[in-house]
Image: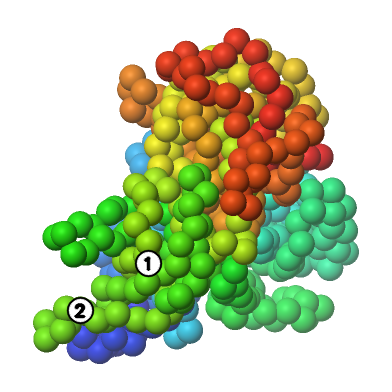
């Protein structure tokens, strides 16, 4: 068994215990077709000794049939699992792989490079902490590089590694690497990508993937795995930015009423002043029950402070109407609440999006009817140009105006992915047809004044007559969560 820890074969419990408290980093690979994304992942797994013997034997056998590397093992076949992927030598579906080092656990998402599979890439990138964008050293920055960089930025991925691959085909020329680095710096400045890392490598031969390469003495940085292993992806837990989508109201008897859910951001203590949204009612936290503290001997354990991403039950000092889908936040750090939104949307269904049609909008634990009132513009993800369109087709990304059946609390996506995004569900097929994410800022638009209810900003476009059929026009209020270029 070609794995990097003998404990997995001799003492599985010790092995699991060893990895129990390691933090996890999720990253995806993206780039143009045939830039070596799957090969890079296969090489990383192979060199870190995370390939089982039967997987290795299968890859050796498949390399003779589908391989593109001569007598060498085609590392891409360790990842490309679909028959059509092996036959075409491309990635179609998102492939997930897991491996671990002494310091960290990793989840890899290998995403397709073809434009027609943009929705697959969005799916893989939606949970990623880091994006690895591969660039062929021979070709430099291509149209697909621009598209993937746009999507990575749209999804709020804060760390981007630019892996200049196939350096072996340009004799590890430093000038070629520097030209690509300079060109991507201009692109990243245009998009506003902040944390950028550059690595010259050869996924085929393993140079600067897991081990440092002697062929790039001019490169002073870490190899790819070393960079990922040491990258700081932690976020400061801010107590004020407490977000608690209510998942379930626990009412086992007349003497107890608790509100269950998973904290999506921040922390909360007993005695903190909290506000329930969208109602705007204010109360205080009476007690906190953390399931992790409950034992067979004592099932009534409470705690004084909890933080994201813990699953807890809160009780309040006052009898406040709180239901599934509501959000509990700190009174001194409120999100905006509105039923009219301006959003950046990725359309993921083969059927076009229809203006005025009612869809189900699911954000965290809440589901409500909503419709699209207008399409401001569609963004060409290759050129970043804005064009006017009447409908959205599969893989389109556009700025749209939405009207919901009732107000909803919304955060900036880059500050909180869970409360700053939602999915659009077809009410007939129950398919997920769209995804809303992205966003650089959140501001009011087209509305001079707003209703202030117990310090909660609520902008309501008068949905008293909501009957499942949207209004024919857009009334102009709302909050802007879109990305501007």
Tell me the element at label 2: loop
Q: Mark 2, residues whose alpha carbon is within 10 Å: few (<14), some, or many (≥20)? A: few
Disc 2 to disc 1, how far (Cα)?
Answer: 18 Å
Task: Residue 176 in the image: state x and y as whole percent.
Answer: 84, 60
The residue lying toward the viewer, choosing from 267 and 154, is 267
Q: Which image quarter: residue 9?
A: bottom left
At a point 25% along the width and 89% down the height, the residue shown is 14
Task: Residue 199 in the image: state x and y as whole percent.
Answer: 71, 68
Q: Which image quarter: residue 163?
A: bottom right
Name the residue that disc number 1 marks: 317
At a point 40% along the width and 81% down the height, the residue shown is 304
Q: In this view, does 366 lie above or below 216?
A: above
At a point 86% along the width and 63% down the height, the residue shown is 178
Which residue is outermost to the left? 296
Is residue 89 visible from the viewing direction of this image? no
Quarter containing the N terminus? bottom left
Name the residue that disc number 2 marks: 300
Residue 368 lies left or right of residue 296; in this view the side is right
Callout count: 2
């Amino acid at each position: 068994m070609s794995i990097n820890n003998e404990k997995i074969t001799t003492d599985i419990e010790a092995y699991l215990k060893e990895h129990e408290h390691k933090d996890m980093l999720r990253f995806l690979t993206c780039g143009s077709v045939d830039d070596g994304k799957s090969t890079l992942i296969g090489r990383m797994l192979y060199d870190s000794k995370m390939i089982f013997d039967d997987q290795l034997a299968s890859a050796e056998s498949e390399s003779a049939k589908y391989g593109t590397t001569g007598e060498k093992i085609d590392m891409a076949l360790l990842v490309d699992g679909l028959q059509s992927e092996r036959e075409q030598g491309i990635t179609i579906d998102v492939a997930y792989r897991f491996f671990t080092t002494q310091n960290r656990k990793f989840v890899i998402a290998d995403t397709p490079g073809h434009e027609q599979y943009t929705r697959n890439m969005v799916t893989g990138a939606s949970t990623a902490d880091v994006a690895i964008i591969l660039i062929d050293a021979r070709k430099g920055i291509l149209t697909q590089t621009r598209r993937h960089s746009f999507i990575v930025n749209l999804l709020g991925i804060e760390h981007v590694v630019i892996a200049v691959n196939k350096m072996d085909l340009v004799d590890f020329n430093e000038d070629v690497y520097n030209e690509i680095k300079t060109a991507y710096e201009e692109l990243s400045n245009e998009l506003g990508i902040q944390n950028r890392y550059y690595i010259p490598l050869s996924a085929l031969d393993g140079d600067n993937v897991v081990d440092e390469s002697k062929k790039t003495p001019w490169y002073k940085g870490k190899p790819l795995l070393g960079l990922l292993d040491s990258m700081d992806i932690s976020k400061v837990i801010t107590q004020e930015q407490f977000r608690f989508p209510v998942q379930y109201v626990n009412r086992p008897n007349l003497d107890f009423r608790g509100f269950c859910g998973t904290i999506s951001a921040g922390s909360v203590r007993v005695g903190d002043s909290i506000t329930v949204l969208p109602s705007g009612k204010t109360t205080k936290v009476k007690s906190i029950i953390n399931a992790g503290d409950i034992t067979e001997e004592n099932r009534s354990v409470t705690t004084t402070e909890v933080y994201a991403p813990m699953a807890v039950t809160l009780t309040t000092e006052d009898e406040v109407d709180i239901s599934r889908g509501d959000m509990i936040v700190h009174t001194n750090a409120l999100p905006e609440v509105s039923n009219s939104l301006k959003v950046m949307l990725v359309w993921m269904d083969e059927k076009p999006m229809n203006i005025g049609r009612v869809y189900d909008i699911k954000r965290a634990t809440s589901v409500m009817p909503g419709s699209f009132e207008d399409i401001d513009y569609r963004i060409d993800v290759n050129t970043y140009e804005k064009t006017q369109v009447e409908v959205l087709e599969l893989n389109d990304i556009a700025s749209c105006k939405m009207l919901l059946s009732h107000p909803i609390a919304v955060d900036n996506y880059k500050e909180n992915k869970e409360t700053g995004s939602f999915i659009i569900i077809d009410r007939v097929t129950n398919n997920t047809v769209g995804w809303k994410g992205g966003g650089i800022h959140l501001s009011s638009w087209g509305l001079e004044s707003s209703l202030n209810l117990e310090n909660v900003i609520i902008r309501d476009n008068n949905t008293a007559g909501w009957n499942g059929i949207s209004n024919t026009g857009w009334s102009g209020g709302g909050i802007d969560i879109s990305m501007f270029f």
